[in-house]
Image (cartoon, rainbow, N blue to C red):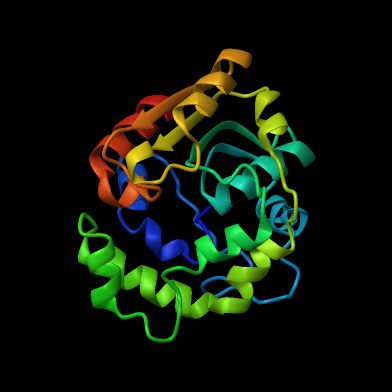
């Protein structure tokens, strides 16, 4: 499950790597993103309902950022939805809507170019930059902003703390803008023995892009 202003194509290296390891891989476009419809409701319950409608049961579910939020909410609704879950620097809380909207729209706008995205993310593969530009233009400002505005006060930390299935939570390098800081991730792992937390040094919020090899090593080691 991809993050905000991304789409399923962003897993262009992750999907084949999982398939090569023997998994059957399904990647979705979240509502408002990619080729999915724009129904107007971008509350987390709606995102989660869409995911639960795709299939009743999965072996492993991977969610990045907003996709991680939707995965957590889906597990609140249906705890047996999957056997294992990987959360890649998930968005766990929206403490201030205005600040969050500013954060998610910093690199969005009609004047953003491929060169700008590449310059802001120098460790990304050129294909990742291209996909990111296309994905955020597909989503549009309304979807990006409303995915925050429709979830005021969202806080999924407590839901993560009581997850009853094996969970790998990967936090970005704090120097690169982690949503899940080491103190929070470590605290959750200490509270819940089902959680394994790892900080990916050198990995940005989109660590599957700039630290692909380490990301896949951790995911495959956990997923078996």
| Residue 43 lies in quadrant | bottom right
Looking at the image, is 123 positioned above or below residue 174?
A: below
Measuring from the top left, give residue 83's x and y in whole percent. Answer: 60, 30
Q: Give left or right: position of 65 versus 125.
A: right
Looking at the image, is 211 positioned above or below residue 110?
A: above
Measuring from the top left, give residue 127's x and y in whole percent. Answer: 25, 67
Q: Give left or right: position of 73 versus 28.
A: right
Residue at 69% x, 57% y is 47
Residue at 24% x, 40% y is 213
Q: Give left or right: position of 185 versus 92.
A: left
Residue at 62% x, 42% y is 92
Q: In which quadrant will I find the C terminus? A: top left
Residue at 26% x, 39% y is 202
- Depth check: give the residue in front, 198 or 221: 198
Measuring from the top left, give residue 125's x and y in whole percent. Answer: 22, 60
Q: Give left or right: position of 59 versus 47.
A: left
């Amino acid at each position: 499950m991809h993050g905000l202003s991304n789409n399923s194509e962003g897993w262009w290296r992750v999907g084949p790597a999982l398939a090569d390891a023997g998994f059957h891989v399904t990647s979705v476009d979240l509502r408002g993103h990619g080729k999915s419809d724009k129904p107007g409701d971008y509350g987390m319950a709606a995102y989660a309902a869409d995911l639960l409608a795709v299939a009743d049961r999965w072996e492993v579910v991977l969610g990045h950022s907003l996709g991680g939020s939707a995965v957590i909410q889906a597990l609140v609704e249906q705890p047996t939805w999957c056997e294992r879950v990987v959360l890649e620097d998930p968005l766990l809380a929206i403490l201030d809507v205005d600040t969050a909207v500013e954060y998610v729209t910093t690199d969005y706008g009609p004047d953003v170019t491929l060169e700008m995205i590449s310059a802001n993310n120098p460790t990304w593969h050129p294909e990742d930059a291209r996909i990111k530009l296309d994905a955020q233009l597909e989503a549009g400002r309304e979807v990006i902003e409303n995915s925050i505005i429709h979830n005021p006060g969202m806080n999924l930390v407590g839901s993560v703390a009581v997850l009853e299935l094996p969970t790998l939570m990967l936090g970005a390098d704090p120097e690169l803008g982690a949503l899940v800081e080491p103190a929070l991730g470590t605290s959750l792992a200490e509270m819940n023995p089902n959680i394994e937390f790892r900080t990916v040094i050198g990995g940005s919020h989109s660590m599957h892009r700039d630290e692909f090899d380490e990301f896949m090593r951790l995911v495959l080691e956990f997923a078996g």
